[in-house]
Image: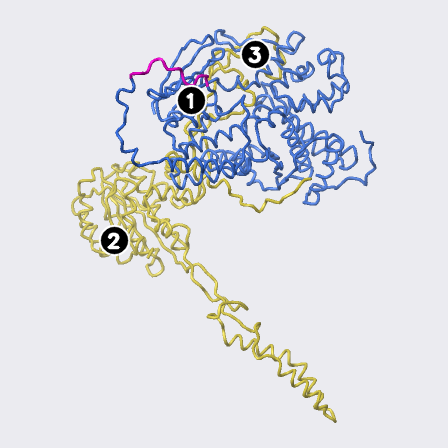
Amino acid sequence: MSIVIDRRLNDRNKSAVNRERFLRRYKEQIRKSVGDLISKRSITDMDRGGDVNIPSKDISEPTFHHGNGGDREMVLPGNRKFNRGDKLKRPDGGGGGGNGSGDGEGGGDDSSDDFVFSLSREEFMNLFFDDLELPHLIRNAIGDVREFKMQRAGYTPSGVPANLSVTRSLRQAMARRIAIGAPLRRQMRELQAAEVPADEEIAELQRRLDRIPFLDDFDLRYRHRVKVPMPISRAVMFCLMDVSASMTEQKKDLAKRFFTLLYLFLSRKYQRVELVFIRHTDNAQEVDEQGFFHDQQSGGTVVLSALKLMHEIAVARYPSDAWNIYGAQVSDGDAFGADPEKSRAFLNEQLLPLSRYFAYIEVPDDPMRTSPLSYAYQRIDSDKFAMSTVAGKGEVYPVLRELFKREAA
Amino acid sequence: MNALQPTSGPLSTGAEWNFELLETYDHAIADIALNEYHLDIYPNQIEVIASEQMLDAYASLGLPIGYPHWSYGKEFIRNEQMYRKGQRGLAYEIVINSNPCIAYLMEENSLPMQALVIAHACYGHNSFFKGNYLFKQWTNADAIIDYMVFARNFVMKCEERYGHGAVEDVLDSCHALMSHGVDRYRQPTPLSADEERLRQREREDYAWKQYDEIWRTLPSRNAGAGDKRGNEPNYPPEPQENLLYFVEKHAPKLEPWQREIVRIVRKMAQYFYPQGLTKVMNEGWATFWHYTLLNRLYDKGQVDDGFMLEVLTSHTNVVTQRGFDQRGYGGINPYALGFAMMTDIRRICENPTDEDRDWFPDIAGGDWLKVLDFAMRNYKDESFIGQFLSPRLIREFHLFAIADHARDEHLLVDSIHNEQGYRRVRQLLSQQYNRDGLVPDIQVTRYDHRGDRSLTLTHRRHRGRPLDDSASEVMKHLARLWGFTVRLQTQDDSGKVVDQQETRA
């Protein structure tokens, strides 16, 4: 009468499409939540999933139902002390009473809390990229697709004709012929050594020996190739930031996204990426990430000091023949006197020859004005250098466009 | 009743299950259920699934197939999150009211649990689906799966043609009105996916044939037509309580495909309608039977003590009723109440006390199997409780009634589990399961189909209970479907209009 069916191997992700729809519908709220996460996270920690909060009221589905008020009776279980006619204080929070327990099966409604759920790494990264308005090609370039190269890995008995290894196959065939023929030949030798050679038997043996094929299907050997991840080397990424008082939290957030994007790119490309954080006011310091983004400093602005420190560190710790050096600089562009000009010269003559790429973004108070620093930097003519003035998150990517374009091609 | 038959010891030992064992147990349980207790069931289709699949099934309201919609994604994420954090275990089973009756078993469960689920779902729920008058009347077990396949394909085709957004809008709006998309008095025509498809295509073809470009270019003739109005009869002549039905048939602006989607949601609401009305009975019936069937297995020596202990542990967890002031209280547990009532009916039949003879003269001392079968077939929660809740159970559950009246400053204890209170508590509890008390009474009262095409709904306020704030959101959804102005009037108990809100499309 009953049929038992094993459905465990059926598709397990039937709800994936609905889940994806939910995410799409509440993209705005989720994005906001992701924004909070980004600001809290370390750059190196960026590419994993995370928990997202959405206020429950935003996602509730309305229906007609009764609100508080009016007359009603409720039956509840577990009376221990009440008697008929007792008066009870109304519980706080309106005339509901008994936590809506009167609604029959409607209890257990915990809708007051935020709706919290986890985003997978892919979903998180996609939202991050959406914010930066990253083109899809680039997403792939720094997303999950790693580059592979085919590498020889011995021989295999099956394959395509193009991969046939002739010497291997013949060697295999020879071994087989020797192995299969050996007992026959031994027998033949014995017969031949006999006083009266049995010609017929010898002829028979010879025929059998002749029947051993020269090359058989299972002799064939093909060159075996396996995919191995591209040999990857190491890179160091210098994050330079002006932390004088004029850099607001919002500018720093922009900076962080910029650094993160570059980091993500590099960490796909290189097996090992080290980060060096250099902050500067009128002198430069190497600090950790926490201090880089969160400590407030006051003082003037000398850009050159940071560039010099970067150069020092690069020469001392990251020789350019062993490391790929990337530089990323964020500033509001205020520089005084001879500093911009000197910085430009130093960057152009000392740093760029060492570096693979150097990107500069400016986060000015007034996007219309050309700052002294960008005025100077504009005259750098090198395909290793890119700069841009950025006011919103969507403008971060174009700075790195050249870099990505080159690497994705 | 059969005599104890000598058997060759337990069917198996240990907690591991495999497919042969499932079948062995199913046979053993079927033997008892069908031959000793004469349960009438649909054929069973027992499907073993993994926990992720159970989560999937949860999200789609337990149906194995459904159209895509974000709200199911929300449900899925919510359940998954709670399950991952360990806040909630998964239900042991999901059973679908279809023919054959599909029951899901979870791979992770131990053998005793699987046997419990088989007894609970495949014999308990299954026989309830087949026997209860509401299910017989309102749902069509043969066709539901096919219909859902049709619905899914249709919705997905619409998404391709008209875009996700447009389809989602219609579905959102329909979902908001789902609780008011049920026929309660008229029996719906049986579903058939083939006929639905055919009918839908016919209507579309008809629309195509009728379409004539020339008519569109004619100047409209509405000038002067509006003057003759005034003494038209009200339309609809009778108030209509099935809002979705009214929208499907009369909404002036809906495209044919949108109407079809309204219809799909309406059919689903209709399908789930009896389940909401029989929660206590259905769960109580199934729980009673897994308890009775497995105990019988044990009495026959087909299962060992360890098996029974595990079954009883789960069983007691399921039928726990917490007091209103205890932690984890979530309303009256339908499993607990239903199971207690079913067991109590059996007790009243087998060992009636004087009190029982007083309260239940027709069933006290009767054949419990017949009485239970009769109750299962002919009642819903409201009437079942009104009829069969015994004073003894009211005492056991320590039930009491609280009156919450707007004009009083305090809540008043209306009645408790004593001689004067029994009838009143029983009546009030029965009322609590009355759908009219839960779902506000909102009906279509006027469609100005010759005028501005506005639609007027009337909410008849029951004992002064107002609508929740989300009503205005629902009205926006209705306005979106209707395409013209919609109004919501509120009448008090005497029929006087006390409030009116208007939503323009």
Q: Which chain is yellow?
A: A
Q: Residue at x 52, y 24 (%)?
A: B183
Name the chain letter of the residue that bears numbered label 2: A
Q: Nearer the viewer, residue B284 or A370?
A: B284
Image quadrant holding the C terminus of chain B, namely top left
Q: Vertically, is A212 above or below A132? A: below
| Residues at discs 1 and 2 both on one chain | no
Q: Position of residue B109 (x, y in %)?
A: 64, 39
Name the chain letter of the residue that bears numbered label 1: B
Q: Residues within 10 Å of mark 3 (few under 14, many from 20)?
A: many
Amino acid at circle 1: Ser
Question: Which residue, as the protein is rendered here, is positioned at the far bottom?
Answer: A195
Q: Secondary structure at mark 2?
A: strand
Q: Residue at x 27, y 25 (%)?
A: B221
Name the chain letter of the residue that bears numbered label 3: B
Question: Which residue, as the protein is rendered here, is positioned at the far left?
Answer: A337
Q: Secondary structure at mark 1?
A: loop
Give the CA separation, mark 3 to mark 1: 26 Å
Q: What are the residue bounds of the magenta stretch?
A: B227-239
Query: Can residue B120 be seen here?
Result: yes
- Mark earlier in primary sequence (3, 1): 3
Residue A7 figure quarter = top right
Q: Residue beneath label 2, please? A: A385
Query: Can residue A36 be seen here?
Result: no
